[in-house]
């Protein structure tokens, strides 16, 4: 066993690099496997890879009890979840367990990567290099289908956005956002200014042409964060790194109207205007009085009596039932839960923006299922099959609500504790840096001024370019999980999140001595 551990330690840099570099190729394999109905093969590959990664961490660690405790907690919770599901009628334990394994990708990958970096901080370079190579692969696999005359769009029905051979557009959008900060950092760290310029240009262009809101607005989040980091860390040398970024941000804003994101939004608004006119005509012919119309148009007002409620229902009923308006979006929900319940969960709204929003429809579906469950199921979550209705999958696109409904109050709290660990470590490290700066602060003047100066000095010492880069990635991953989704439940996205989390953990807790300031 010791010989195997020694061998793994000797090859660890190459293993980590290979693991990351493999990801875009697996994504392309999933794309073509889906076209030929072979998704089960790539799913098994992903689960097999996860098992190997966990085994790697278990063999490397000296604190095997951490893995055993995590496994024990998950096993106990899942046993309780499954027993409850059997109590109320289990539809598919296999599919439900597969969903759990997808959710466990982040904790397991992150724990293994933390283990790999413990006592080996130099291996962070393997992560950065791996992500940079991944980004180049993504560009290649995005460009190839377009180069051979078979373009793949982010939004296929609209023929908008440049995607490439990637199966899930929202997941690939998240991958680009998570790899961009580390790709820029790796380009900067190469020490070659042309490589930095090329890295910045490629990341901004790719995010711009992908076409999702997440990618487009991340241009300004990532660019603004790097401008701040360069200014506080590089001082007089910052302009040569700041100005190219600033120029690209200005160009991205100036040409926003030509972006796939803006064009898609314009088409969506145009479609909603058409439906808005149809809804107005429906309400005009319903005979509803002004008070009833005010309740329907308002997001906060609710009927004050049963009589008023009945008036509201009669007025909006055609909107939710007529397949020529939005009945085609709520038809399955009406049949499953009853039209009155559906109208109530939507707040009797007549807003095309809400009624045409797939995410909102799926969320309201989950809320209606949740209302049917008892207290114990609220505590432990309901099974994944409850998201399925006929041939339609109402699984939530946003990760955190999906985790909440699948794992209940208890499981969701356990899951969030893992994230809380990272925030605790980061804030503790920042507080330590500020405390050390305050201890050495000799500035004369008011106490408040000395404290602010010490805080700023500590922040600069803590927020190196490297810490900033992985911090941007970590925070964007959490934001993307909530806003866009397909981050925590897609292994091809989760692995980049886990890598950033492990590097952040390494930078803030595993280094006994402060690292030299990035230059």
Image (spheres, rainbow, N blue to C red):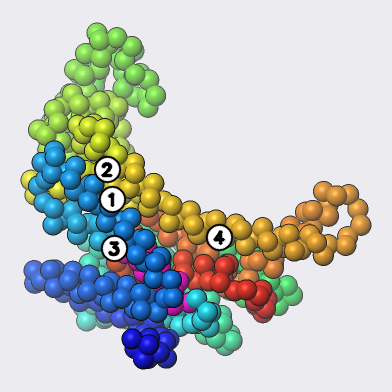
Q: Residue at x 59, y 74 (%)?
A: 511
From mark 4 to mark 2, how far is it between C-alphas? 28 Å
Q: Which numbered disc, 2 or 1, marks the residue that appears first in the sequence?
A: 1
223 sits left or right of 145 in the view: right
Q: In terms of image quadrants, where is residue 515?
A: bottom right
Which comes sooner in the sequence, label 3 or label 4? 4
Gap in angstroms between the C-alphas marked 2 and 1:
8 Å
Q: Pointers 1 and 4 in contact (CB under 8 A)? A: no
Q: Secondary structure at mark 3?
A: loop
Magenta stretch: residue 462 in it? no
Which residue in the structure is indicated by mark 1?
A: 77
Q: Residues within 10 Å of mark 3 (few under 14, many from 20)?
A: some
Disc 2 marks which residue? Answer: 380
- Residue linked to disc 4: 425
Give the residue pinned by disc 3: 490
Residues marked 2 and 1 touching at CB (< 8 Å): yes
Spatial CA span between label 2 and label 3: 22 Å
Question: What segment is highlighted magenta in the picture?
Answer: 105-117
Going by the image, does 400 lie left or right of 320?
right
Q: Are marks 3 and 1 in contact (CB under 8 Å)?
A: no
Q: CA distance from mark 3 to mark 1?
A: 22 Å
Q: Quadrant of the C terminus?
A: bottom right
Q: Secondary structure at mark 2?
A: helix
């Amino acid at each position: 066993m010791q010989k195997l551990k020694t061998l793994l330690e000797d090859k660890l840099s190459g293993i980590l690099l290979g693991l990351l570099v493999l990801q875009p190729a697996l994504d392309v394999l999933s794309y073509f496997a889906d076209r030929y109905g072979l998704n089960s093969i790539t799913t098994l590959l992903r689960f097999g890879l996860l098992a190997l990664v966990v085994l790697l961490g278990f063999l490397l660690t000296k604190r095997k009890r951490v893995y055993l405790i995590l496994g024990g907690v998950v096993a106990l919770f899942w046993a309780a979840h499954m027993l409850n599901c059997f109590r109320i009628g289990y539809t598919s334990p296999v599919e439900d367990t597969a969903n759990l394994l997808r959710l466990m990708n982040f904790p397991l990958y992150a724990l293994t990567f933390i283990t790999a970096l413990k006592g080996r901080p130099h291996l962070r370079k393997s992560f950065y290099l791996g992500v940079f190579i991944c980004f180049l692969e993504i560009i290649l696999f995005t460009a190839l289908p377009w180069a051979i005359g078979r373009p793949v769009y982010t939004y296929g029905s609209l023929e908008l956005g440049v995607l490439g051979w990637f199966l899930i557009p929202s997941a690939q959008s998240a991958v680009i956002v998570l790899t961009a900060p580390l790709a820029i950092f790796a380009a900067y760290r190469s020490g070659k200014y042309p490589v930095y310029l090329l890295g910045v240009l490629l990341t901004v262009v790719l995010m711009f042409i992908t076409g999702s809101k997440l990618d487009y607005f991340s241009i300004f989040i990532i660019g603004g964060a790097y401008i701040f980091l360069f200014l506080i860390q590089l001082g007089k040398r910052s302009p040569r790194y700041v100005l190219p970024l600033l120029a690209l941000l200005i160009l991205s804003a100036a040409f926003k109207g030509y972006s796939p994101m803006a064009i898609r939004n314009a088409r969506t608004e145009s479609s909603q205007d058409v439906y808005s006119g149809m809804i107005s005509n429906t309400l005009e012919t319903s005979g509803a009085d002004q008070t009833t119309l005010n309740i329907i148009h308002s997001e906060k007002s609710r009927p004050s009596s049963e009589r008023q409620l009945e008036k509201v229902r009669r007025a909006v009923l055609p909107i939710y039932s007529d397949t020529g308006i939005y009945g085609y979006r709520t038809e399955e929900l009406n049949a499953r839960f009853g039209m009155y319940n559906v109208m109530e969960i939507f707040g009797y709204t007549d807003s095309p923006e809400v009624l045409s929003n797939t995410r909102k429809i799926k969320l309201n579906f989950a809320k209606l299922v949740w209302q049917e469950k008892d207290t114990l199921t609220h505590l432990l979550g309901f099974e994944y099959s409850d998201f399925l209705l006929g041939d339609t999958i109402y699984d939530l696109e946003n990760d955190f609500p999906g985790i909440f409904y699948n794992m209940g109050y208890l499981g969701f709290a356990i899951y969030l504790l893992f994230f809380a660990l990272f925030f605790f470590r980061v804030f503790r490290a920042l507080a330590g840096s500020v405390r050390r700066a305050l201890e050495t602060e000799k500035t004369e003047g008011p106490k408040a001024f000395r404290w602010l100066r010490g805080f700023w000095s500590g922040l600069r010492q803590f927020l190196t370019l490297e810490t900033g880069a992985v911090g941007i990635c970590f925070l964007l991953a959490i934001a993307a999980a909530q806003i866009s989704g397909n981050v925590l439940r897609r292994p091809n996205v989760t692995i980049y999140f886990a890598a950033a989390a492990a590097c952040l953990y390494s930078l803030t807790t595993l280094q006994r001595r402060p690292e030299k300031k990035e230059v």
